Amino acid sequence: MSVVVTSAERLLAGPPVEAGAESLAAHTARLGPLPRPGTDFIAVVERSGLLGRGGAGFLVGRKWRAVADRAAGRAVVVANGAEGEPRSSKDRTLMAARPHLVLDGALLAASAVGAEEVIVYVGADHRAAVAAMQRAIEERDSATRLPIRLVEAPVAYVSGESSAVVNFIESGDGRPTASPPHPRDRGVAGRPTLVQNVESLAQAALIARYGDDWYATAGRGPTSGTALVTISGAIARPGVHEIEYGTTLAELVAAAGGATTDIEAVLLGGYFGGWVGADDLREVPLDPALLAGRGASFGCGLIGLLPGDSCGVWATARIMTYMAGESARQCGPCIFGLGAMAETTRRLAAGSAADGDLDNLARWAAQIVGRGGCHHPDGAAGLLTGALSIFSSEFELHQRERRCSRQPATARRVA
């Protein structure tokens, strides 16, 4: 069974992704004009059970309803394509290939919540996506009543967090701000603001065309629909795939050409997700609800395969160093906590552990949660806690004997 959804009614249907951005004329010929759903399209989205695709997995309909209840016709919709997650490329791929599907979703959301402006927020380093979305906006200039503008997001891990999105649009500072107020209450220009991931909006555009019952025709378990995933690491054909929720890791790996070597662990859901043992995950359905029941997270759909000859301590040290460097540097847990955790993990990986380093990491990872100015420290701490469990024997070897069980030439290879 192929795990890549090929239905003419799914996100990546249409011309080959490699062909570049689909024009408005081609998009309209293939899918028809922008739908005009009934008076309560939010109810349709709610019935569909559509989950947000930015990583947190909030119900999209509920999020729209919260903004609509506050909007009074003056809200703002932000199509969030910052995609600061390392190795994830699903959002930029979607925007570069299907920009008008994203704009359809953004305009439908604007109509549903009562917005008077749409902002497309795209990572500045995603050049193909920036160009495609800008051209698509220009093609829409005479066809829409709402103003649409593009803002290039700073290249930073935290820049896609909803309050950081609003902060950058307002002030040029792409760091999260303390809540309250939440963007749904006061966001861009002080107006209620819906910050929604671009894949979520594209899915909503298809639901508007085909209905909530159609959306439920994909998905093998409790979660309906399809999702874009990025598979990387020890895989023959890394890249973006559209899968049904409930597809197993083994099926996805097969569809991507197979693993290039034995797999030790899987980085699931991105850096805000965590490590999962490959044998534990192989036949588990990639369904957010089922994964949550196992203490794992689908997150942003990133699936990184760590080769069996790579060291989990080195891989974790690299991620912790990145997370410390990408902090907003606005609170003690980020400035001091993440820095200490990264330095200690690197010391363990390098074979120069100090007495008590492993115990300190476990203690700090527990202490830091919930104490930051935003959730960035929580994600780093969660990933480290999982690593200490999945790679426990390797961490203990690095602490006890100050050495790695892998060969030096391969010790630093990561997912």
Image (spheres, helix red, strand yellow):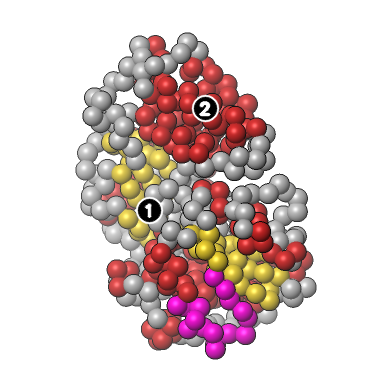
Task: Give amino acid for label 2.
Answer: Met
- Mark 1 or mark 2, which is nearer to you? 2
Residue at 31% from the left image edge and 32% from the top image edge: 412
Q: Which residues are magenta?
A: 135-150
Q: Position of residue 204 (x, y in %)?
A: 54, 69
Please give left or right for residue 408 compared with residue 29 in the image.
left
Residue at 56% from the left image edge and 27% from the top image edge: 365
- The answer to which of 24 and 135 lies nearer the viewer is 135
Q: Secondary structure at mark 2?
A: helix
Magenta run includes residue 58: no
Disc 1 to disc 2, how far (Cα)?
28 Å
Q: Position of residue 374 (x, y in %)?
A: 64, 43
- 225 w.r.t. 36: above or below: above
- The quadrant of the picture occupied by the N terminus is bottom left
Residue 398 occupies which quadrant of the picture? top left
**Is tag 1's residue or tag 2's residue first in the polypeptide sequence?**
1
Disc 2 designates what residue?
341
- The quadrant of the picture occupied by the C terminus is top left
Task: Give amino acid for label 1.
Answer: Thr
Residue at 53% from the left image edge and 59% from the top image edge: 153
- 24 w.r.t. 196: above or below: below
Q: Secondary structure at mark 1?
A: strand
Residue 351 occupies which quadrant of the picture? top left
Please give left or right for residue 263 compared with residue 215 in the image.
left
Disc 1 designates what residue?
230
Residue at 33% from the left image edge and 48% from the top image edge: 232
> Which disc, if any, is residue 104?
none
